[in-house]
Amino acid sequence: MRRMTARPANAHQERVLKLLRDEGPRSRAELSGLIDLSRSKVAVEVDRLMSAGLLVVDGLAASRGGRRSHRIRLSPELRFLGVDIGATSVDVAVTNAELEVLGHLNEPIDVREGPVAVFEQVVVMAGKLKAAGLAESFDGAGVGIPGPVRFAEGVPVAPPIMPGWDGFPVRKALSQVLGCPVMVDNDVNLMALGERHAGVAKRVDDFLCVKIGTGIGCGIVVNGQVHRGASGSAGDIGHIQVDPDGHPCACGNRGCLEAHFSGAALARDALAAVESGHSTGALADRLAASGTLTAADVGAAANVGDAVALDLIRAGGDHVGHVIAGLVSFFNPSLVVLGGRVTGLGHGLLAAIRTQVYRRSLPLATGNLPIVLGDLGPVAGAIGAARLITDHLFSPA
Amino acid sequence: MRRMTARPANAHQERVLKLLRDEGPRSRAELSGLIDLSRSKVAVEVDRLMSAGLLVVDGLAASRGGRRSHRIRLSPELRFLGVDIGATSVDVAVTNAELEVLGHLNEPIDVREGPVAVFEQVVVMAGKLKAAGLAESFDGAGVGIPGPVRFAEGVPVAPPIMPGWDGFPVRKALSQVLGCPVMVDNDVNLMALGERHAGVAKRVDDFLCVKIGTGIGCGIVVNGQVHRGASGSAGDIGHIQVDPDGHPCACGNRGCLEAHFSGAALARDALAAVESGHSTGALADRLAASGTLTAADVGAAANVGDAVALDLIRAGGDHVGHVIAGLVSFFNPSLVVLGGRVTGLGHGLLAAIRTQVYRRSLPLATGNLPIVLGDLGPVAGAIGAARLITDHLFSPA
DNA sequence: GGCATTTTGTTCCCTGGCGGGACGAATCTC
DNA sequence: GAGATTCGTCCCGCCAGGGAACAAAATGCC
């Protein structure tokens, strides 16, 4: 199995590679039409990419009334690693160059243990995937981390929930231990990239991707490109104020969205509800069984119809929806995608968010606006991470 | 005086034209360096643009140790019209190709009288500017209107404050009566373009431009380009909710930003304050003098230290600042520009907004974030409009 | 003042990118 | 089997564009 040796030499080669990645195998003649280049020129560039080991001929396609065409595809030997580091767990996925997930691992971590410990575990996980025969080596890796990133350097900047990571050269360090090129981005941005590549936002150029988990963030895609902002903190909507007299937040302010709706907030409110005697059913049982309550417990209780759980989810959805309504008015996206673990809370959450947005935003902005759950589930971030590194490697140097 | 006959034939010519527009006259040698093209090639393209009547040689520059260079500039005969239609007045400006304002008129209108009446007046104003010797004809016109626009066609869509304009083919109609190419956009977007071209946002690629006047809107510049959104309503922040129990708004909801702070809201609140006996000074005098109160009265009263006026402005600034704080967290701009008539309210408004943003948004997003007033005053929109049409005409067809 | 130096603008040549046409190969249809 | 289609390849020619060389016009040193 050979490693990817070269980067594309020009913009034509870049377009060929990205088209084959995003749309799958094509013949030379099809490529010629799709990237508006003569057949002779396409043949030349394809030949060069084949001798660079990036493309292969994968048999013949069915005839369409004449000579059968060669099916050109990205080398099936290329392997990329998508790493999605969350606050409490990591997802590591192996993909081919078409970003199909060949294998996937999820393990719990504690991001507060610092980058070195986390990277050790990631390397071990990558090793397990290799041992399973999914890859001999990796041609590149994308990494998502739950905090703002200075994208050009691949370095976290002032991440609130990741003490010890500030300024750590994630890109350089991981590139060394993994032995391949690495690109780093915020986890929410990568989820947006993933959903845009293979999920519900395919071919959508302007959309928002709201991830609700330990915290709340929003990926912003403008013109098909992720908007990262002046300091890499764009999409950081967890600390928008939803109630001036609300709960105190770890950031020092009051009434932040995250303080009112997130994994931790939901658990806190559920506990309070049970202890004050408001819960009559499933939630109390779960508390009695495990001694504590988590967001997942609330979701499970809601699924069996627990009224308190349903109320909590609805109240949270109202808060998120209120914020999203503002963002929709401001940004006027053509799609809103919801993702993250907390979206497993059932249909009540989505309904509450939709109600708020459709009621609060102007009809012109919402008239044609789908608000939907992401397609890709927990691997969205890892797929986006793989896409990030291929975007980089498939661009001319 | 000859009319602009041709559009640039290729991307090189486009770059030359836009560079000369934005940076002023340059020599061929300088152009060669600035657009990374050989001197021979630059000479060829400049020659072509000169015979198309778009460029001229404007004397010799001072020597820099060798042969003196020819100063190449955009033809000084080109004339563009910038039209900024507001709810209650129009600004019409004549510019040269470098977007310097050669003359400027402002006249009151009522946008509710419909497009035909307004365009008649605009044509008369353009005639006055011609009669003053500022132009013989126009090579293009940019037009801003106070509502959402379907940009590709230049047609207003569902503008709330402009009954009778919905779907009216503004671009086509104005192009006919003015006899030149026309581009149409939202007035706030054009203010942002203006400030980016010649104002405080020069060379800034990601910023927000908040215009406070009859309504409140926000121009969004991403990657140097205006973001207009899926239905042309991006930046419509006037109806973001700032108080669930707040004033009713014309849009049917409660507590919209515009219902709490805008020209009309300020006048309403000032009147209420005086009538309930809270105002002791300047405001009451002004009411007695004219029988009514406007936002301008509040500003004047604040400038002479009237406490009620200052309070009203501060409360309004708190509301706007609260919304902007959310947008800053979300978008992470590198600059926030404030413009529009209400910014003449004095320093209290700016201070209140700054306080809210710096207190509410995360330090990472605000650490290096200037919040400033626009430079260009009432002509910002007209300059942006002229820029819009040159952007169009200086691009290859 | 003379001469070397520097900068600009122009001309000329050569290369490389790329399109188009011709051709052969492979396949379908009649 | 003949003609039509489609695909891939080869070859020719155009031209965009870079680089070198040169002329023109200025500076500055001696």
Image (tube, coloured by chain):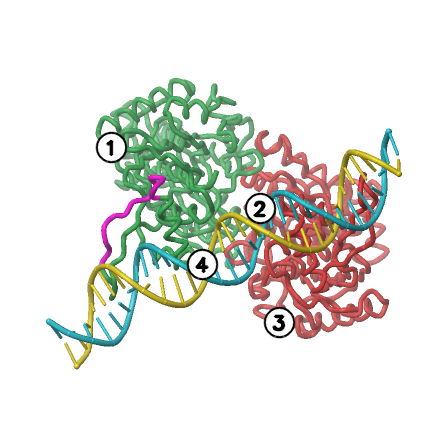
Chain colours: A red, B green, C cyan, D yellow
The residue pinned by badge 1 equals B134
Closer to viewer: mark 1 or mark 4: 1
The residue pinned by badge 3 equals A172
- Which quadrant of the rendered structure holds the N terminus of chain B? top left
Closer to viewer: mark 1 or mark 3: 1
Closer to viewer: mark 3 or mark 4: 3
Q: Where residue B158 sits: x, y (%)? A: 53, 25
Which of the two residues, A150 or D13, is positioned nearer the viewer here?
Answer: D13
Q: Amino acid at mark 1?
A: Leu
- Chain letter for mark 1, please: B
- Tell if the residue under mark 1 belongs to the same chain as the one under mark 4: yes
Q: Give the CA distance from mark 2 to mark 4.
A: 23 Å
Does residue A143 lie above or below C25 as drawn?
below
The residue pinned by badge 4 equals B368
Q: Give the CA distance from mark 1 to mark 4.
A: 42 Å
- Tell if the residue under mark 2 belongs to the same chain as the one under mark 3: yes
Q: Give the CA distance from mark 3 to mark 4.
A: 26 Å
Provide the secondary structure element on which disc 2 rests: strand
- Tell if the residue under mark 2 belongs to the same chain as the one under mark 1: no
Q: Amino acid at mark 4?
A: Asn
Answer whether residue B229 is visible to the viewer in this image. yes
Q: Read off the magenta span.
A: B50-62
Does residue B236 lie above or below A258 as drawn?
above
Does residue A151 lie above or below B190 as drawn?
below
The residue pinned by badge 2 equals A222
Q: Is residue B169 left or right of residue B195?
A: right
Q: Where residue B14 sits: x, y (%)? A: 43, 46
